[in-house]
Amino acid sequence: MFFAQLLSLGLAISTVAQVVVPEASFYAGVQYAGDYITIDANNVCYDIPDILDFDPRSAKLTGGIICVLYRTNDCTGNALTTLYGNVQGLPGRVMGARCQPSPGTN
């Protein structure tokens, strides 16, 4: 009985320790293929051509975040699109990206 309680406690601790880090990974190919880079969801504008040597074609988002993609590298003007989850094919040429936790997840 004592062993069963220890086992339950160990499983509970290991489950709690699995924290999903809020970040976005941008891939060179559609359907998450090829090279990729991961950025933090810290509400900072990332100049995509400055940090990538490829045009991103797909994206995976973790930890309940939103990413706004822009046609400009300083994240100004109208957004190209807003991502709320994984996207297997990105529209247009992404020049800037700003990711942040979704409301209610931070």
Image (spheres, rainbow, N blue to C red):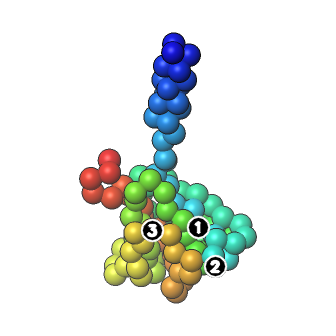
Amino acid found under the numbered disc labelled 3: Gly
User: What's the CA distance linking mark 2 and mark 3?
Assistant: 15 Å
Residue 44 quadrant = bottom left
Expressed as whole percent of the image width and height from the top left, the position of residue 62 reads 48, 57
Q: Disc 2 or 3, which lies upstream in sequence?
A: 2
- Determine the residue positioned at 63% across, 76% down: 31
- Determine the residue positioned at 49% across, 62% down: 61
Label drawn at residue 85: 3
Tag 2 residue: 30
Give 7 or 22, whichever is nearer the viewer. Answer: 7
Q: In this view, does 83 lie above or below 91?
A: above
In the rendered view, does 75 fall on the left or right side of 56?
A: left
* Closer mark to the observer between disc 2 and disc 1: 2
Label drawn at residue 26: 1
Residue at the outermost top position = 2
Expressed as whole percent of the image width and height from the top left, the position of residue 46 reads 49, 63
The answer, for residue 50, to whether it is visible in the render is no
Mark 2, secondary structure of its residue: helix
Residue 72 quadrant = bottom left
